[in-house]
C-alpha cells in the first residue's frame, strides 16, 4: 500500500525561456505536480509556435497550454501568488535578475540559442540544459539531446549534444521548405494567423515591404507575433504540410520527448539516495 502521508516533491524550478520546448518542459513538470515553476523570457519574445507557449503571458497577463495556465509576474510576491493558485509564473528575464529574491533548486536552460548565453553549473544544485552549446560536467550537470533521431531526449551526464545542423526536422517528407524566414531586417507585419490553411506562394506577411511567402501547402502551425522586429534569416513561421489544425494547439512529439527527459532529470535529482 502506498502511504498518503509523504509530502509532495516540489522544488523551485527556474526555466530559462518560454518558447515551445521550454513551455513543454514547464507543462510536463507541472503535470507531475511540481508546483513552483518560474519561467523567464525576453520582453519581446521571438516565439513562433505561440499557441503552445507560455510567453504570451507577458503581453496578455496569462497564457494556457493544454489545460495548464501561466501568469505574468514582476516581483517575488507575484511569483508566489501564481504558485498559490497552482499556476506557472512567467517573468521578464531582466526583471528576474533585478527584482526577485527566489533561489532556484533547479535551473533548466531551454533558450535553445545553440550556445551558452550565461548559464553556469554553479547556478543551482541541479542545472539542466537543452541541446548544443553546453557540456555536461562543465556548463551544467545534464544535457538533453534535442536533435531528431535515435538519441532524441537522451540524458547526457558527460559530454555534449550533437552539433547544430541548421537543417529543420522533416515533417511529411518536407524539411527546409516548410520553415519561413525573414527576407530582410526590420519589422514583421503578419497577414495570416496560426491555423490558417495556405497554398504554395501565399503571402503570410512582410518585412519592411518585402513579402514573406509559404514554401509549401499546409496549415500555418506557427507565426511570430505581428510587429516584432527581426533580423534577416530569423525564423518567422512554420507551415505544416499535414494540414491538421489541431496540431497548432497541442505540444509536438519532439517537445513531449524532450520534456519527458527533463522530468526524468529532475526526478533523478530529487529522488537520489541521500
Image: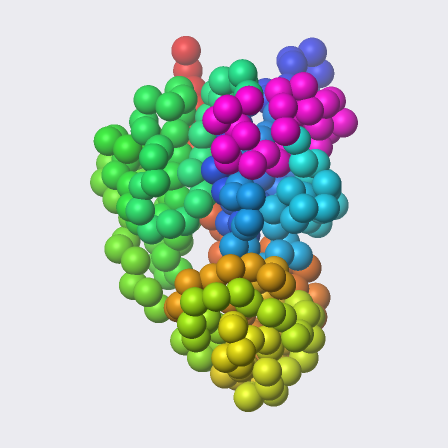
Compared with 273, 242 (above or below) is below
User: Is 160 one of the magenta-colored residues?
Assistant: no
Name above or below for residue 248 compared with residue 7: below
**Which residue corresponds to the image point at 35% horizontal and 68% vertical from the top-left?**
167
From the viewer's side, name the closer residue of 58 and 252: 58
Q: Quadrant of the C terminus?
A: top left
Q: Is residue 176 above or below residue 66?
A: below
Q: Main secondary structure of the magenta part?
A: helix
Residue 231 is left or right of residue 244, and the answer is left
Tell whether 127 sits left or right of 171.
left
Q: Is residue 49 above or below residue 33?
A: below
**How many callouts does the rendering have?**
0
Q: Position of residue 257 (x, y in %)?
A: 49, 50
Residue in front for this viewpoint, 225 or 195: 225
Q: Name the residue at 50% across, 24% down.
A: 98
Residue 174 visible somewhere in the drawing: no
Q: Is residue 8 left or right of residue 264?
A: right
**Quarter of the image with the N terminus in it:** top right
| The magenta stretch spans residue 98 | yes
The span picked out in magenta is: 74-99
Residue 213: in sight, yes or no?
A: yes
Picture quarter containing residue 265?
top left
Residue drawn at (38%, 39%) of the image? 129
- The quarter of the displayed image where residue 127 is located: top left
Q: Is residue 248 left or right of residue 136?
A: right
In the rendered image, residue 111, in percent from the top left (x then y), is placed at: 44, 45
Q: Position of residue 38 (x, y in %)?
A: 58, 31
Q: How is the image coloured?
A: rainbow
At 60% from the left edge and 77% from the top edge, which residue is drawn?
204
Q: Nearer the viewer, residue 69 or 57?
A: 57
Amino acid at each position: 500500500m502506498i502511504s498518503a502521508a509523504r509530502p509532495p516533491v516540489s522544488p523551485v524550478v527556474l526555466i530559462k525561456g518560454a518558447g515551445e520546448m521550454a513551455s513543454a518542459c514547464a507543462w510536463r513538470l507541472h503535470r507531475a505536480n511540481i508546483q513552483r515553476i518560474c519561467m523567464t523570457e525576453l520582453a519581446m519574445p521571438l516565439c513562433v509556435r505561440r499557441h503552445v507557449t507560455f510567453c504570451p503571458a507577458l503581453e496578455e497577463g496569462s497564457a494556457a497550454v493544454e489545460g495548464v495556465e501561466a501568469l505574468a509576474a514582476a516581483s517575488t510576491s507575484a511569483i508566489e501568488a501564481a504558485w498559490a493558485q497552482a499556476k506557472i509564473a512567467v517573468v521578464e528575464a531582466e526583471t528576474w535578475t533585478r527584482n526577485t529574491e527566489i533561489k532556484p533548486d533547479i535551473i533548466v536552460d531551454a533558450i535553445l540559442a545553440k550556445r551558452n548565453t550565461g548559464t553556469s553549473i554553479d547556478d543551482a544544485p541541479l542545472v539542466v540544459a537543452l541541446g548544443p552549446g553546453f557540456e555536461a560536467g562543465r556548463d551544467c550537470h545534464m544535457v538533453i539531446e534535442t536533435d531528431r533521431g535515435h538519441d532524441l531526449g537522451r540524458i547526457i551526464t558527460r559530454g555534449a549534444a550533437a552539433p547544430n545542423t541548421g537543417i529543420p526536422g522533416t515533417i511529411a517528407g518536407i524539411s527546409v521548405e516548410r520553415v519561413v524566414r525573414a527576407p530582410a531586417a526590420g519589422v514583421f507585419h503578419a497577414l495570416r494567423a496560426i491555423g490558417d490553411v495556405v497554398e504554395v506562394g501565399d503571402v503570410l506577411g512582410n518585412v519592411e515591404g518585402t513579402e514573406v511567402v509559404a514554401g509549401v501547402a499546409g496549415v500555418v502551425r506557427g507565426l511570430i507575433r505581428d510587429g516584432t522586429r527581426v533580423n534577416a534569416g530569423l525564423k518567422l513561421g512554420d507551415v505544416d504540410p499535414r494540414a491538421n489544425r489541431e496540431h497548432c494547439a497541442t505540444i509536438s512529439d519532439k517537445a513531449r520527448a524532450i520534456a519527458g527527459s527533463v522530468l526524468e532529470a529532475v526526478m533523478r535529482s530529487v529522488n537520489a539516495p541521500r
